[in-house]
Image (cartoon, rainbow, N blue to C red):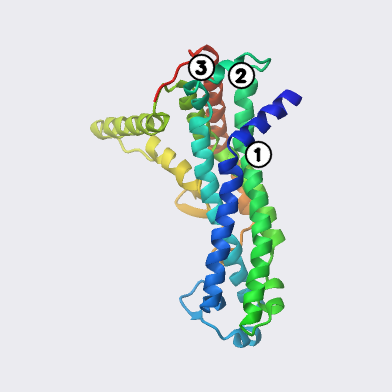
Amino acid sequence: MNAFLTLIKREYWEHRGGFFKAPIWLSGIFLVLIVMAGITGKSAMIQFDGSEHMVEGGLKYLETEATPEQLRMGTDVLLYGTGSIFSVVMFFVLVFYCLGSLYDDRRDRSVLFWRSLPVSDLHTVLSKVATVLLVGPMIYMAAIVIFQLVLLGVVGLLVLFQGGNPMVLVWVPAEPLTYWGRMFVALLLHALWVLPLYGWLFLVSSWARSRPFLWALLVPAALSLMEVWFHATASLKIGHTLGDLLLSRLSTGFAPLSWKVEEGDETMMIGNTDDAGMSTEWSYIIERLWSADMWLGVIVGIAFIAGAIWIRRYRDDSATE
């Protein structure tokens, strides 16, 4: 167990730029933009009920005329909007981490050093899987919590400087604990949902001798084109192709709280309901857990990871640019 934890620590220290520095830079950029918006008076804009009607300034009007639901929606936009940006950055960081995780140590020959230690290839690969499924998402979850606490304080001060009451307009309507709880659960389920994508990237990283990014894209693209061509020439009507499934996993990889679920002829967005604006319902988040697509993808992801472990064990130690 100690050796496995050491391997996970190794992953963090070798990739702390993406796991640690990226959310710090992102938080700083966000805060600068919000302060600049506050200085120009734009921070007082609140959108009501998803309509195009905007109220600029007029904080006293909002305190007396806006309903609690409308004020809550305004803070939801703030929390869900900034959290979504963190999720997008996290997704790209984890994708490129997977692509280089088993390729880079073969390229720089450091794999020879790690194989001289009493650490198996199984533990090495599993430590990288644990990093991408748990460690990375939880680091970004912590970054979201810290940033949004600071954000609510800064926005409250900006509202105060503009003559409004931050307690009425920002702090009381905000529901950060609800958002953080849903985000935490969504990140865990999302890791399972995107497991086939991560597993494929691990497989390519363990196998490719050069340019794993191109291999990761070209192989699924070629298979998708062949599948479409085959069905087109056979004059068969098909519902979903491999390309559709890949695009579905990619598109939902960006936002854990806005998954698209298709049930018959109906399409439902998990994380965004028609009558609750930016709010999410626990039932919609948990519903993904009982989806057949979820567990089929988990099986495929595990198969890819098993292939990555086997290839790393028997692959030669060379990789070139």
The amino acid sitting under disc 2 is Trp
Residue closer to the observer: 259 or 25: 25
Q: Which residue is mark 2?
A: 114
Residue at position x 61%, y 59% from top? 280
Residue 301 percent across, percent down from the top left:
54, 30
Residue 123 is at least partly visible in this image:
yes
In whole angstroms, how far apart are the C-alphas of marks 1 and 2?
Answer: 21 Å
Whether residue 256 is visible here, answered yes or no, is no
Label 1: how many Cα within 10 Å (few below 14, some 14–19, many 20+) = some
Dot 1 or dot 2, earlier in sequence:
2
Q: Residues within 10 Å of mark 2 (few under 14, many from 20)?
A: some
Residue of label 1 = 135
* Relative to 117, residue 147 above or below: below
| Residue type marked 1 | Val
| Distance between mark 2 and mark 3 Cα atoms | 16 Å
Q: CA distance from mark 1 to mark 3?
A: 24 Å
Task: Please report the residue visible at 26 percent of the width from the left and 30 percent of the height from the top.
Answer: 234
Image quadrant in which you'd find residue 162: bottom right
Query: Residue 241, percent across and down?
Result: 38, 37
Query: Comparing marks 2 and 3, which lies closer to the viewer?
Result: 2
Location of the N terminus by quadrant is top right
- In the image, residue 198 lies at what x, y percent? 52, 34
Query: Relative to residue 213, is residue 81 depicted above or below?
Result: below
Return the disc, 1 or 3, that comes first in the chain's sequence: 1
- The secondary structure type at the circle numbered 2 is helix
In the orientation shown, which residue stands out farthest toward the right?
A: 2
Q: Which residue is mark 3?
A: 311
At x 52%, y 76%, the residue is 42
Q: Amino acid at mark 3?
A: Ile
Q: Is residue 263 left or right of residue 128?
A: left
